[in-house]
């Protein structure tokens, strides 16, 4: 499956080469600047640090190469989500959000969109097509949804939403453009948090918006420039560096997640297990059809809160932490944030540790938590 993406990831490491002059550094220089030397007519040159920055452009070039679409960088995933909303929505619009997706998108809509006259409805990802899309200006999907890992059929949602006159925004954070390609499946906009696997080292927040629609990207660009939610050059530099190893990290994380999910499926102490790559998962057939990999997130439910916490804290190769996609495996009990999941539900983010060692550590901690 992942072979399809190989030509794209191979070229990624050499994107800058064609732009280099003899004697230029091969590694990306960090441009820290609010001012640029600008006598006379300013058009066609770097003007001001809120408008453009060479380091952002380099990371946007990489992301654009991966998305096969123009990209704009943002200081976080939520800044990217907000930019997509503010670029396209107006008073009177109604939008549809997943009820089981990343909760901040719903809170943002409730706190700030409703009072500007944009209303929203919620619908579970697993039955997202039910009820159709009549009356919506924008349909927002997240598949696999974080944290429950239900899927929806991107192409089917796009077809039905477009027929109803809505645009489709896909939050592709859980998969990255290496694991799933919503724009190729017809989505109008991709938003993503590069805080997660794309940066991969748990030391920066970043996000991006990608779209092949020029009008949408012009509006997103104006939003960024006028509202001022711009990425920091150093953060962009870090993400650029992270993206250079995304392929090697992502493929290993997905390989290990597949291995661990099979092993976890054989245990009798989990009350539920979700991983799109498992043959018995309710989303498996859809996952095979629309994803390039099955991802690196596993949803595992232990009997209760106490056992789940004991498992996480007792595993020497799991970092107890919120967020995911780092080189180190991490886990957390999502009910502690009020997500609509069982008290013993643990979202496991598989990192880059050797798979056998990781399994032994997980097994040891699960055995201990059982007692
Ligand atoms: C983390 C996350 C976000 C928000 O990203 P930040 O970089 O934390 O702002 C948005 N969507 C999903 C699915 C996420 O997991």
Image: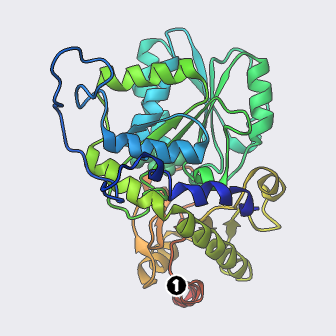
The residue pinned by badge 1 equals 369
Say which residue appears at 48% left-offset and 20% top-offset. Answer: 218
Instruction: Report whether 132 appears left or right of 60.
Output: right
Q: Is residue 160 above or below residue 282?
A: above
Q: Residue at x 65, y 73 (%)?
A: 255
SS assignment at label 1:
helix
> How many labels sit on residues?
1
Q: Residue at x 52, y 90 (%)?
A: 368
Check disc 1: other Cα within 10 Å, few if <14, some if 14-19, many if 20+: many
Relative horizontal placement of residue 167, taking residue 316 as reference (left or right) = right
Where 368 falls versus 151 (above or below)? Answer: below
Q: Nearer the viewer, residue 328 or 246?
A: 246
Q: Nearer the viewer, residue 152 or 209?
A: 209
- Where, by quadrant of the figure, is residue 202 drawn? bottom left
| Quadrant holding the N terminus | bottom right
Q: Is residue 132 visible?
A: no
The outermost residue toward the front is 22
Q: Eyeballing the image, is 158 above or below 162?
A: below
Q: Position of residue 110 (x, y in %)?
A: 45, 27
Quarter assignment of residue 158: top right
Residue 312 place in picture, x, y as percent: 46, 76
Q: Quadrant of residue 299?
A: bottom right
Q: Residue at x 47, y 12 (%)?
A: 117
Q: Is residue 60 left or right of residue 289?
A: left
Task: Please state the horizontal and vertical placement of residue 64, each as a whole percent of the image.
Answer: 53, 41
Residue 17 in the image: state x and y as whole percent: 45, 53
Answer above or below: position of 65 versus 314.
Answer: above
Q: Is residue 315 visible?
A: yes
């Amino acid at each position: 499956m992942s072979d399809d993406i190989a030509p794209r990831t191979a070229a990624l490491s050499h994107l800058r080469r064609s732009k280099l002059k003899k004697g230029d550094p091969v590694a990306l220089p960090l441009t820290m600047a609010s001012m640029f030397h600008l006598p006379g007519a300013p058009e066609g040159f770097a003007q001001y640090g809120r408008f453009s920055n060479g380091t952002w452009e380099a990371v946007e070039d990489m992301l654009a190469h991966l998305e096969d679409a123009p990209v704009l960088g943002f200081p976080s995933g939520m800044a990217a989500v907000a930019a997509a909303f503010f670029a396209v929505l107006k008073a009177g619009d109604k939008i549809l959000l997943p009820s089981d997706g990343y909760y901040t998108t719903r809170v943002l809509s409730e706190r700030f969109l409703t009072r500007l006259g944009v209303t929203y409805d919620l619908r579970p990802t697993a039955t997202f097509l039910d009820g159709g899309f009549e009356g919506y200006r924008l349909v927002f999907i997240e598949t696999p949804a974080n944290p429950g890992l239900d899927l929806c059929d991107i192409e089917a949602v796009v077809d039905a939403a477009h027929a109803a006159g809505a645009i489709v925004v896909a939050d592709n954070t859980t998969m990255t453009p290496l694991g799933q390609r919503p724009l190729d499946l017809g989505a109008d906009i991709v938003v993503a948090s590069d805080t997660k696997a794309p940066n991969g080292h748990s030391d920066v927040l970043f996000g991006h918006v990608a779209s092949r629609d020029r009008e949408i990207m012009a509006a997103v660009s104006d939003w960024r420039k006028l509202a001022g939610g711009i990425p920091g050059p150093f953060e962009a530099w870090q993400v650029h560096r992270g993206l250079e190893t995304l392929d090697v990290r992502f493929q290993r994380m997905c390989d290990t997640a597949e291995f661990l999910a099979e092993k976890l499926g054989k245990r009798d102490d989990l009350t539920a297990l979700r991983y799109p790559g498992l043959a018995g998962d309710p989303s498996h057939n859809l996952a095979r059809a629309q994803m390039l990999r099955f991802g690196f997130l596993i949803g595992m439910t232990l009997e209760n809160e106490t056992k789940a916490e004991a498992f996480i804290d007792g595993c020497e190769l799991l970092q107890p932490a919120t967020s995911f996609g780092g080189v180190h495996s991490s886990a957390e009990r999502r009910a502690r944030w009020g997500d609509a999941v069982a008290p013993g539900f643990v979202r496991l983010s598989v990192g880059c540790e050797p798979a056998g060692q990781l399994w032994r550590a997980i097994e040891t901690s699960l055995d201990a938590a059982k007692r």
